């Protein structure tokens, strides 16, 4: 993968590509005042992931420091103060909008005022701390010399890997110019979890989104975002 593709992949972000996806439902937290039976009932069966159909035609792609990120009155984000993004709906569209907005803000190119609080409060998993350390190191090593992300990066498509109200996994496709002037496509997979009333993104192995990106030849098999194809 060339340098441009790796930097672009860092902006859309991704979790490790899974060979299989098994998503379980959140356990019920309700209590009862009646005594428990001698034999406890069996645990609730896992909720099988589905491939949702979402209407992305009404998404508004708002400018964010030279980049374009989706916004929806129904799906969120409800709070964009300080350049951050939170408050997403517990719906398929909410999950899709959340993974793009949260993952994008983990890129060190946006500066520690954005990536640090995003990772600390909206990224989960065992590699979240490594992601923050890597971002701080990269930014301190001269990130200002890297070209602006909007010079070549654009999220143009997606494909669901699975969805439940507590977990979502989606492949995002980003486009950018190749060295010969052609368009280069990279796909990354992002997993999110519904935690404490909002979506959180799972950090990729090693905390490095670029390691999870794969270059693809075309958009065959992916759905595109209207207005983002070109």
Image (tube, helix red, strand yellow):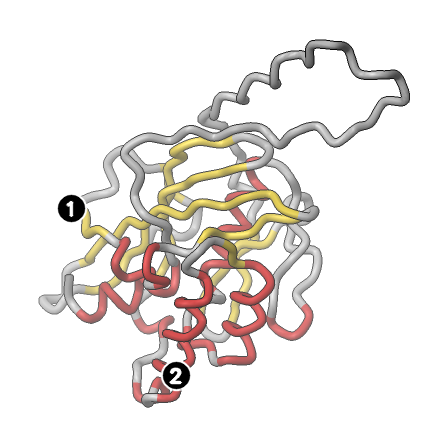
The residue at the point 38 percent across, 31 percent down is: 21
Residue identified by numbered label 2: 139
The answer for how far apart the CA atoms under marks 2 and 1 are is 31 Å
- The percent coordinates of residue 131 (x first, y second) are 41, 67
Q: Residues within 10 Å of mark 2 (few under 14, many from 20)?
A: some
Quadrant assignment for the C terminus: bottom left
Instruction: Provide residue 196's location: percent of width, then percent of height.
Output: 68, 48
> Toward the viewer: 190 or 230?
190
From the viewer's perspective, tell me whether residue 171 is left or right of residue 97.
left
Q: What residue is drawn where x is 54% and y is 22%?
A: 47
Q: Quadrant of residue 84?
A: bottom right
Residue at 47% x, 80% y is 111
The residue that disc 1 covers is 217
Residue 58 on image: x %, y %:
57, 44
Which residue occupies 52% across, 58% down?
123
For mark 1, give the secondary structure: loop
User: CB under 8 Å between callouts 2 and 1?
Assistant: no
> Against 162, is 124 above or below?
below
- Relative to 115, is 143 above or below? below
Return the residue found at the far front.
38
| In this view, the mark in front (2 or 1) | 2
Answer with mark 2 or mark 1, whichever residue precedes in sequence: 2
Q: Estimate the x, y position of residue 147 in percent, counting from the top left.
A: 31, 81
Pick the front one: 121 or 65: 121
Q: Quadrant of the N terminus?
A: bottom left
Up-down: is 208 above or below 193?
Answer: below
The secondary element bearing badge 2 is classed as helix
- Which residue of the protein is positioned furthest toward the right in this rendering? 33
């Amino acid at each position: 993968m060339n340098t441009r593709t790796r930097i672009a992949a860092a902006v859309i972000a991704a979790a490790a590509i899974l060979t299989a996806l098994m998503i379980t439902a959140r356990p019920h937290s309700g209590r009862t005042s009646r005594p428990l039976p001698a034999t406890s009932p069996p645990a609730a069966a896992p909720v099988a992931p589905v491939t949702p159909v979402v209407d992305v035609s009404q998404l508004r792609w708002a400018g964010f420091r030279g980049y374009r990120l989706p916004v929806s009155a129904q799906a969120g984000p409800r709070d964009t103060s300080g350049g951050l993004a939170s408050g997403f709906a517990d719906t398929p569209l909410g999950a899709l909008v959340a993974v793009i907005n949260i993952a994008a803000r983990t890129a060190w190119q946006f500066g520690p005022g954005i990536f640090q609080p995003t990772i600390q409060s909206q990224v989960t998993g065992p590699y979240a701390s490594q992601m923050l350390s890597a971002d701080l190191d990269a930014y301190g090593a001269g990130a200002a010399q890297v070209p602006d992300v909007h010079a070549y990066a654009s999220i143009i498509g997606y494909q669901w890997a699975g969805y439940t109200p507590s977990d979502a996994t989606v492949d995002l496709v980003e486009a950018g110019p190749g060295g010969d002037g052609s368009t280069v496509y990279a796909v990354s997979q992002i997993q999110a979890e519904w935690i404490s009333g909002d979506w959180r993104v799972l950090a990729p192995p090693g905390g490095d989104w670029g390691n999870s990106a794969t270059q693809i030849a075309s958009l065959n098999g992916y759905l595109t975002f209207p207005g983002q194809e070109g």
